[in-house]
Image: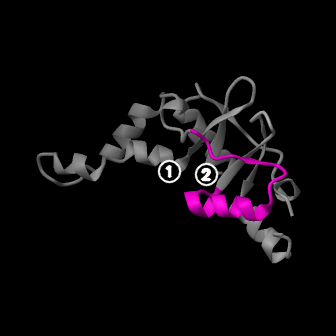
Amino acid sequence: MKVSDVMIFDITAVFEDETIDRVIDMMSKQFVTGIPVVDEDMRVVGFITDNDIMKASIPSYFALLQSASFLPDTNQFVKNMARIRDHKVSEYMSKPPIVIKEDAPLIHAADLMMRHNIKTIPVVDDDGRLLGIITKIDILRAALEGGLE
């Protein structure tokens, strides 16, 4: 079975200059944890996830150690989210993106997901243009139906 047999074609993508605020709104409304980032030619240039945004918003352990009290400021997360809400997606997206072609075997998609600890992979054509996405659930469903090979 190939990626094209189980991929999702009806997908959302964002441009690099989209704001974090807008991306969070899109993710929450569509119940997704990540969105492909594309250029004006619909070529995948990155991938933004809720995890990327959380990493940008939560102070690191070393930053906490440098604070005067060594106690985490519970409001720091909220302050950081307010600070980055209007920042561009391009500042926080994962790049270069991990992508897969539509004619790749499903087992290859599963391998990429496991090796890179990701849940979603953008599916692209030979020119790198976005065609859809494939998720771990898509692969698990195909495996239950006996179609990974």
Disc with the residue nearer the chain's start (2 vs 1): 2
Q: Which SS class for mark 1?
A: helix
Foreground: 147 or 144?
147
User: In the rendered view of the protein, which quadrant contains the C terminus?
Assistant: bottom right
Q: Are marks 2 and 1 in contact (CB under 8 Å)?
A: yes
Amino acid on which the number 2 mark rests in the picture = Thr
- Which class describes the residues within 10 Å of circle 2: few (<14), some (14-19), or many (20+)? some
In the current view of this chain or complex, which residue is farthest to the left?
68
Compared with 96, 6 (above or below) is below
Residue drawn where x is 64% and y is 58% of the image = 112
Position of 138 compared to 29: left or right? right
Position of 22 compared to 110: left or right? left
Picture coordinates of residue 61, whole percent (x, y): 26, 53
Residue drawn where x is 81% and y is 56% of the image = 3
Picture coordinates of residue 89, whole percent (x, y): 54, 33
For marks 2 and 1, give the CA distance. Answer: 8 Å
User: In the rendered view of the protein, which quadrant contains the N terminus?
Assistant: bottom right
Compared with 85, 124 (above or below) is below
For the record, the magenta segment spans 96-119
Note whether residue 86 is visible.
Answer: yes
Which mark identifies residue 51?
Answer: 1
Which mark identifies residue 33?
Answer: 2
Residue 80 on the magenta segment: no
Amino acid on which the number 1 mark rests in the picture = Asn
Picture coordinates of residue 140, whole percent (x, y): 74, 70
